[in-house]
Image (cartoon, helix red, strand yellow):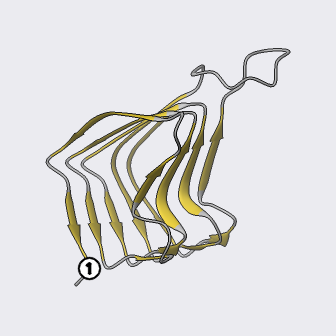
Amino acid sequence: ISIQESSISGNKASATIMVTSRSQGSSQLSHSIHLNMDKTDFISEDVQTSIIVNSGGKLSTSRSLFIGNKAESIIKSERGTTNVIRTEFSQNEVADDEGIIVLDAASQMEESELNCANDE
């Protein structure tokens, strides 16, 4: 799945994007779904969990912007793989016990470079 040069704003839901990847006929998560986002902006989202929830998939975001969002975390990965490159996080409000990017013990951050986080 590819999302390019898009702007998503003003949603109120459980999450803006939820990716769940499972093996056929199995409850085990796999990396069969790859979500690639390039130049995608998330602005003023107000969600209950995370802007992006990645359960078992592979998430890659580059040159994207997350600004003025409210959520438990901005990106959450559960048994998934995440790549974040040249992405800016600005003026987001996350839960005290969470963070901007949250990975569970079974998740992996493959690549994280040239990102910027600004709370001002």
**Callout 1, which amino acid?**
Asp
Q: Where residue 115 sits: x, y (%)? A: 19, 53
Quadrant where the C terminus lies? bottom left
Q: Is residue 1 visible?
A: no
Name the residue carrying label 1.
Answer: 119
Residue shown at 58% from the left, 34% from the top: 79
Asked where in the image residue 91 lies, by quadrant, the reply is: bottom left
User: For the view shown, which residue lies furthest in the right direction?
Assistant: 25
In this rendering, position of residue 48 left or right of residue 50:
right
Q: Is residue 24 visible?
A: yes
Residue shown at 30% from the left, 53% from the top: 64
Residue shown at 26% from the left, 79% from the top: 119
Query: Mark 1: which secondary structure?
Result: loop
Q: Where residue 59 sits: x, y (%)? A: 45, 36
User: For the view shown, which residue lies furthest in the bottom direction?
Assistant: 120
In this rendering, position of residue 114 left or right of residue 43:
left
Asked where in the image residue 85 lies, by quadrant, the reply is: top left
Up the image or down, 11 lies above or below 83; here it is: below
Q: Tag 1: Cα neighbours inside 10 Å, few (<14), some, or many (≥20)?
A: few
User: For the view shown, which residue lies furthest in the left direction?
Assistant: 114
Q: Where residue 62 sits: x, y (%)? A: 28, 43
Q: Nearer the viewer, residue 53 or 12?
A: 53
Up the image or down, 69 lies above or below 58; here it is: below
Q: Where residue 48 sits: x, y (%)? A: 65, 71
Up the image or down, 32 lies above or below 47; here it is: above
Residue shown at 24% from the left, 49% from the top: 63
